[in-house]
């Protein structure tokens, strides 16, 4: 008869073997958490290995992502489409089993983890999504949305600041279906953690309003099972289960030390460990009876079928709710989306307004929210500055989760990783907001969205020295270059309410890239456009004003487009025929055909000037060594915005002077 | 007779007037914390307004930096060189009083604050520096280093994740002379915090091992005074004093609401407030008797004189310790520094080693630490990977602070902001370390070092896809571009042990810029150099190999320099005369004379190819529109390093092909 210990040892064996074969990886955590995983996955986890996308499945997140072999072992043993050969290819080029769990590579990986603290924050987002969707779609009779979100995390996650942000908010919001397991093994890379991590974690999580189950023996199945039951029975608080474990459990010479954290155990030690665990099987060998005990395909199929039946009866009793749920699950926009939006954009073009793009953004949000109830806004305590609320926005609160707005508090990083979790869960279109400068606090979570190719819309206002008096700590310089240079990320910096609306439309429609929307604090003048130009905004860059011939191309974005147009008029009077290119999204422009790009940035025109109140360097890729840039080459200062623009050379006079000097230089 | 309330009202009046005149700013926090500030500054703070740099002064940090008028008022009233006209120029171009307190602008501003949570973290660094220097220099008879570090902080700081990182570590290290005041006013920008911030903060800080003094009435001078005494009497734990305050205290219509948080009160409300507070003076008017009560010049002078006397007798009894302390305070390097280092570099050049630059970095650290006992290392739990320990490194521990190494735990952001604090304190040369990717978690603190123009050395290892199997979550792509594009920041990416040593020398000597040192995980081949080339490394970029004529310039850094040299040999055999430029620091190279730069990157050579395993875009500023870049244009993958370099085109064959294609193209 197969014991629970045997079942857990299957994980240990596969993890040791996988890491050994790859000659790199982290065996310690999988071996330490194997018993917990066995109880959770075999006794509680609601999932269907044959359909990893079943909407009502429990979510499982491995926040200590370096323990990836734990997850791969679980997926393989449970019957997901992840073969033993996939496990043998751990950490190899093109495999489904990269060094850290990567979303989209192996089925059943709910999110990419590795950067510590972000997995637990993603999980908070998933639990928020579940609670919100349940509140929207469940009826007194039927719970169509009803699942738990489970997370494994280690000391590293708990030390990271983001864990404070996400877990504090989880407590405030009373996310009762979030259950986290702390792998309390006392070891991190530098050694025994007591010299640098002496928090009373129980007390800490109690201070956040969590239920904390302390002192669970992470190698005692009964204790683990009892703890999970207690956690599931408390639906008003998230639960932290503190599991005392031995890192590298089973390894006679390395267990309990950091030697087994991040390196293969070695052939000899693996042999000794298998002997010690009474595991009598070869490398990557799992006996049939153990596979059988682990396999969750049949039970998973039954669970999903049950849900399908529930959904069927729900659909008959709640036709419109069901239609809406289906649309949300399928990630579809309403059929009238395009036509309605396009019509509105034409109206905006025909009714010029000189407003800040953050205000134009608020108008866009107002417009979009009418069509998309799944729009779920939020800001890191800057709602009145980011202008992210709308007439029908309503905050989520612990006891009323029917809203569509999240007051994230001053928690930029937590917010952004939570949004990743909401997005991964599905059913909502979340956006967050902060000042562009404080994107930096959150940056790696936005990068994770880019890496995962998921939607994460961030509203970043106060985009330059144009924010004025708050000064250089708040004035972005190099931040836009940083966003644009991030693979898979799309950044927009619109110049008026029309480009703002297009940028929002693009962000909503783009399901495979995160989008950073960059808005001004100060008012911007609306630009004239014909219908063709209106269409071309979506190409990221287009000719805004032109001459019969082109002596000079000025490229500008956002608040500097108005300046470029004014300067081009002045240059015309000096005999310089100038084309002004508005380039709200360099990322989108770069993805256009060579033909289109050359039609905008005429290759034979060497006189090119870029104007943007951001770091100059970035624009060299468009203007070349013969061109010039009017940008920022230092930090800003604290002063009224108009004084700053003048001080840093963003004036018609300076643009004209720089342009004329360049033209003169290039004649030589 | 002047009451304490009158003295506090002077702060309120100046803060209201300053914000009103600037038409922007934050009056609420200064008005709410005025009573606390009055007690702290007039009863306890050890400082000398005539010498803001007195080494043994107490440090005061306003972590809620938006309340800058509080600090400016205190400095002005206490007698610092900050006139009433300076206060009237609040938030104006070129003033000493920018919107947030900026280090180096007004005397007495100990650090730049505004980005929330970083001030408290800087303060943790200052308290670490004090405790370490005290441990090094104090004798059984004399405490030459003996001061407190006080911090004001608000709800925003407490919500930010970095506060968790820094305060957790402060508890572990037992920083008994760190005293923080929480402005518990229940208000943040979005409104009343209870909907998004419901932590039991008392319990939270107790979980970190702090002494917490709860329930202090922030408008009751006696309670505040008692609390500070209790805090100062506990030298084994940092203390959090929880002060219940009313934001905008005194304003009859706006106190207690977020209306007074971030906007002028308005003329009418100021009038009503002054009446309510019984403050009968005009705009920016402070009566003489109030100035007199506040002025700390005489008492400050006496305190410093007493210390000077202590130092005098100390110097006679501890000659060598005193000499060392003086050198440290004056931030001087030992006299033999240059000659010893240069000799060592020549030895390195003459004794080639093919080692990873992270290993070369460890060798540099070992060498430097022998000469500089003030070198204070650390890593965010990656010591064995970053290779940041050395033969004589010794960890700081709560009960033994005589060491020189800090195990920061998995706390990148906290670490980097703490290092800013250590650096600002003086007496130590701190460095931190993490993987280059996780610089992102910490990035805004490094930016703050750049903004403040202070030394902050960060060792960032695992610098590219060359780290291999850990995969794209850990493989930097756009991170180096981001660092290089940050004003005032100096980044180095050396190609071998010789460039590594030079980069470390540069980092140690550079007291006005933070330095990011980028190192490889994998081994790098050492390059040949003559003495002239050896000298030119410090210029950031130089000709490493050359031909009689130059058909092509290849620019490379770090691990790609070896590839560039190999490819140049292959190109030579195909008749292409190639110059290879090694450019370990683009920032330093950019600061060279036009003449030098043109001698390296010959302006008439249009065939330019940059090679770096980082985002391609960055290099366009050197290669121009005619040139090309072999770089990264996507995220990496999980696989062994050699497979990845091959996959992404970092091979001799590909370099040759791209170069030949470019030359062909440019002939047309």
Image (cartoon, coloured by chain):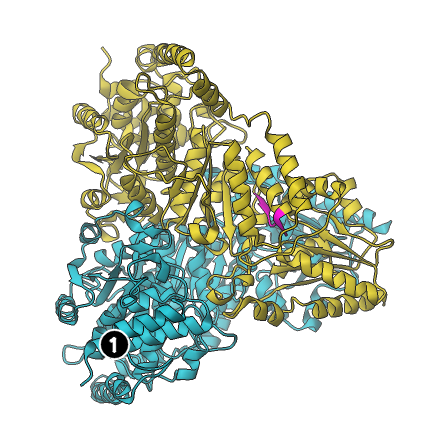
Chain colours: A yellow, B cyan
Identify the residue at horizontal 54%, vertical 64% (top origin).
B487
Residue B233, picture quadrant: bottom left
Q: Position of residue A361 (x, y in %)?
A: 54, 46
The answer to whether residue A159 is magenta is no
Magenta span covers which residues?
A: A490-497
Observer able to see residue A199? yes
Observer able to see residue A285? no
Task: Please determine whether, in this image, residue B153 is positioned above or below residue B35.
Answer: above
Task: Please determine whether, in this image, residue B253 is positioned above or below residue B427.
Answer: above
Q: Secondary structure at mark 1?
A: loop
Q: Position of residue B199 (x, y in %)?
A: 24, 48
Identify the residue at horizontal 13%, vertical 65% (top origin).
B234
Q: Which residue is mark 1?
A: B278
Q: Is residue B238 left or right of residue A408?
A: left
Residue A232, picture quadrant: top left
Identify the residue at horizontal 32%, vertical 52% (top origin).
B159
Residue B77, picture quadrant: bottom left
Q: Position of residue A527 (x, y in %)?
A: 69, 52
Task: Please determine whether, in this image, residue A77 is positioned above or below residue B495.
Answer: above
Identify the residue at horizontal 87%, vertical 49% (top origin).
B668
Q: Position of residue B504 (x, y in %)?
A: 47, 65
């Amino acid at each position: 008869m197969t014991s629970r210990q045997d079942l857990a040892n299957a994980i240990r064996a596969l993890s040791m073997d996988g890491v050994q074969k790859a000659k790199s990886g982290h065996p310690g955590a999988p071996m330490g958490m194997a018993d917990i995983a066995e109880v959770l996955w075999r006794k509680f986890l609601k999932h269907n290995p044959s359909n990893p996308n079943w909407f009502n499945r429990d979510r499982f997140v491995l926040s200590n992502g370096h323990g990836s072999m734990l997850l791969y072992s679980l997926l393989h043993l449970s019957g997901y489409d992840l073969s033993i050969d996939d496990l043998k290819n751990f950490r190899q080029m093109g495999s489904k089993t990269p060094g850290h769990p990567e979303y989209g590579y192996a089925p059943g990986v709910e999110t990419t983890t590795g950067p510590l603290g972000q997995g637990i924050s993603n999980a908070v987002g998933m639990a928020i999504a579940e609670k919100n969707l349940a509140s929207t779609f469940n009826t007194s009779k039927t719970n169509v949305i009803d699942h738990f979100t489970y997370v494994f995390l280690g000391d590293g996650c708990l030390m990271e600041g983001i864990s404070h942000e996400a877990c504090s908010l989880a407590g405030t919001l009373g996310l009762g279906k979030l259950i986290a397991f702390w792998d309390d093994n006392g070891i991190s890379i530098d050694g025994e953690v007591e010299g640098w991590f002496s928090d009373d974690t129980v007390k800490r999580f109690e201070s956040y309003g969590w239920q904390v189950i302390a002192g669970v023996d992470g190698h005692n199945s009964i204790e683990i099972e009892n703890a999970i039951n207690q956690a599931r029975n408390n639906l008003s608080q998230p639960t932290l289960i503190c599991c005392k474990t031995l890192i590298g459990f089973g390894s006679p010479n390395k267990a309990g030390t950091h030697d087994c954290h991040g390196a293969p155990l070695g052939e000899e030690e693996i042999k000794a460990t298998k002997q010690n665990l009474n595991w009598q099987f070869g490398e990557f060998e799992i006996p049939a009876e153990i596979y059988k005990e682990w396999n969750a395909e049949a039970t998973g199929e039954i669970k999903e079928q049950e849900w399908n039946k529930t959904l069927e009866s729900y659909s008959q009793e709640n036709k419109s709710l069901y239609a809406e749920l289906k649309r949300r699950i399928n990630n579809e926009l309403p059929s009238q989306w395009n036509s309605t939006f396009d019509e509105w954009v034409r109206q905006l073009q025909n009714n010029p307004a000189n407003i800040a793009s953050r205000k134009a953004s608020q108008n866009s949000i107002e417009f979009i929210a009418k069509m998309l109830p799944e729009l779920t806004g939020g800001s890191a305590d800057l709602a009145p500055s980011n202008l992210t609320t709308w007439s029908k926005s309503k905050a989520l609160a612990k006891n009323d989760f029917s809203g569509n707005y999240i007051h994230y508090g001053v928690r930029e990083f937590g917010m952004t990783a939570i949004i990743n979790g909401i997005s991964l869960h599905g059913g909502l279109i979340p956006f967050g907001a902060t000042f562009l400068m404080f994107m930096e606090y959150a940056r790696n979570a936005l990068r994770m969205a880019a890496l995962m190719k998921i939607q994460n819309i961030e509203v970043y206002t106060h985009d330059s020295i144009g924010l004025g008096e708050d000064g250089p700590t708040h004035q972005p310089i190099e931040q836009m270059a940083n966003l644009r240079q991030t693979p898979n990320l799309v950044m927009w910096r619109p110049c008026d309410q029309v480009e703002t609306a297009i940028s929002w439309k693009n962000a909503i429609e783009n399901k495979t890239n995160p989008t950073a929307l960059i808005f001004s604090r100060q008012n911007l003048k609306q630009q004239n456009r014909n219908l063709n130009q209106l269409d071309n905004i979506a190409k990221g860059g287009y000719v805004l004003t032109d001459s019969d011939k082109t002596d000079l191309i000025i490229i500008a974005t956002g608040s500097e487009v108005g300046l470029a147009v004014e300067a081009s008029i002045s240059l015309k009077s000096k005999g310089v025929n100038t084309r002004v290119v508005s380039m709200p999204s360099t990322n989108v422009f770069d993805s256009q055909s060579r033909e289109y790009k050359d039609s905008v940035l005429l290759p034979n025109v060497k006189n090119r000037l870029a104007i943007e109140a951001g770091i100059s360097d970035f624009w060299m890729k468009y203007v070349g060594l013969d061109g010039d840039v009017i940008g920022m080459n230092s930090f800003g200062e604290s002063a009224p915005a108009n004084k700053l623009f003048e001080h840093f050379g963003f004036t018609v006079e300076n643009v004209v002077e720089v342009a004329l000097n360049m033209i003169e230089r290039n004649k030589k």
